[in-house]
Structures are given as structure tokens and as C-alpha cells.
Amino acid sequence: MKTIDAKGQLCPIPLIMTKKALGELKENETLEVLMDNETSVKNVTRYLEEMGMKPSTGKKDSIYHVFVNKTSEVSENVNVEDFCTINNERLSDYIVSFQKNKLGEGSEELGTILAKAFINTLPEVEAKPKKLIFLNSGIYLVLKDSPVIDTLKKLEQMGIEILVCGTCLDYYKKKEELGVGIVSNMYVILESLSKTSKVIYL
Amino acid sequence: MKYFILIFESTHHSLKSEKLLTGLGIKFDIIPTPKEISSDCGMAIRINPALFDEQLVSSILNKNNITFHLHEKVYK
């Protein structure tokens, strides 16, 4: 039996570790995955079941032990990250799309502080968006010297995905200065927007 | 963690304070005034106590005729 320790790891790390370990095992060998939170256990279990395996879970001293026999080959084509986001119960099914670095029309200085205040409020609201998208001058909010960079990093750690328009970074010549999030393209952005139940445009 | 919250009498004062404090190189966050502090929908400034020099902040704001109220808020 092989044991991997995914304690303290956030999605998708436990899934990636599980997939890698399974790939290295021989048929019918047993894998044990150690985790310290229920969400990770659910994600890993769902992934294993989807792969046609039958995991079992035990809990001892607040540590979860998931056992699984490798009864089938693990498909390389499966994107483990797909087993993450849906089960992140703290996040709601909506996206906030920042079309510019200000909020609303009218006074620029007012719009600037409103945008900052909006972002600084997100860590405190219960229904957090699952993704934030930054387009056009909105990318100024995710640069290293952005006044809300610390808050955005905190949100990213909470599991909120931050997608930044790569074309826009390029246009404003700010690629090197990106401070948070993933550089993304129109395919990913459009797919995200079309799959979610609600989008808030700012 | 405990933070200091600076509340102002108008949005114009919030805006002006933001510029003044930024000019001094002070690190802070702009937040909506916490509901438990005031029911108006103004903008407030949140400062980490470790980075807060009350004398410096008071003197620059007073010099610009801005009055503020200092509150504390504990964040999880």
C-alpha cells in the first residue's frame, strides 16, 4: 500500500497528488490519501468514483483516510480541476466581471474608490463569487502596485479564481507587472461567462 | 485581527484623505463604512494598527480641515 499526505493542501492539489500516485501504482494495489478537510475528501472521492473505482473513507483524530484499490487505469485525459470548483461550498455560482478599473459612470475619482471598496468588501460577504474576471483597464486592479492587491491575493487563497485578459495586459504593456491571477484568453473567459448562472458586470 | 477604521463626515473628505495618506506612503484599504459603526453608506479607511501612526495621520488630516472618527474592528 502506498500512502500520500495531502493534509493542508487546497484543491486541486489533493486531486493532482491522487492522480499522480494512482498512475504509479500497479493494478490492484491500494492507495491511501490523507486529508484534513471534508471538501477535499468529497472532491477526491468523486474523482475516484468517476474513474470507476470504489473508495472508502475513515476518520481518525480529525484526519481523513481515503483508501482505494486501483481497479482501473487512470485516464490522462481527465482534468482533475473539474472536480474542484463545483464542490467549493463557500462559493456561490456567480462571476464578477471588471470591465474597467472604476465602478460606475460619472466622477472618475469616485469610481476609483468605489471599485476599491467593492473588492475590499468581497472577503466579508457570505456569498462569494467563484470567479473574478478583469478586462480592459480592469487589469490595473490586478497589477503588483494595485491598492487592492493584498485583498485579491486573499480572495485567490479562498479558492476564488482570478482570470485576467492577456490581450489587455499586452495592450497596456503590463504583462510583467501582473500581481495576482491567471493570464487568460477569450475562449476561457467566454466559457466561464456562459457556464455560470449569473454575471455581475462592473 | 484588529484594525483601525477611520470614518469621515463626507465622501469628499474620504476621497481627500485617501489622496493625502497615499501621498505620505501610508498603507491602508478603502472599505465601505462597516454597518455596525454607521448606517450611512460612506467610505472609510482601514489601517493595520502596526502601520498606524495616529499623530501623523491626525496632523495631516487636521491641517486639511478634515475631521475623522476612529473606530476599531476585529476581523476574523
Image (cartoon, helix red, strand yellow):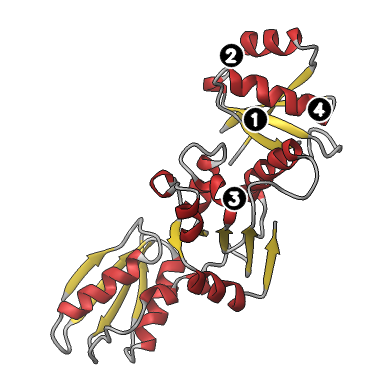
Which chain does the residue under circle 4 lie in? B
As drawn, A67 above or below A176? below
Dividing the image into 4 quarters, which one contains the N terminus of chain B?
top right
Answer yes or no: are tags 4 and 3 on the same subunit: no
Q: Chain of mark 1?
A: B
Nearer to the camera, A189 or A117: A189
Disc 3: which residue: A137
Q: Is B13 left, or right, of A33 in this rendering?
A: right
Say which label, 4 or 1, has the lower sequence index: 4
The spot of residue B33 in percent (x, y) is 76, 36
Residue annotated with mark 2: B53
Secondary structure of residue under mark 4 = helix
Q: CA distance from mark 4 to mark 3?
A: 24 Å
Q: Amino acid at mark 1?
A: Arg
Tell me the distance, in whole angstroms, between the alpha carbons under discs 2 and 3.
33 Å
Residue tagged by mark 1? B46
Q: Secondary structure at mark 3?
A: helix
x and y, in percent, of residue B42 in the image: 81, 35
Q: Nearer the viewer, mark 4 or mark 1?
A: 4
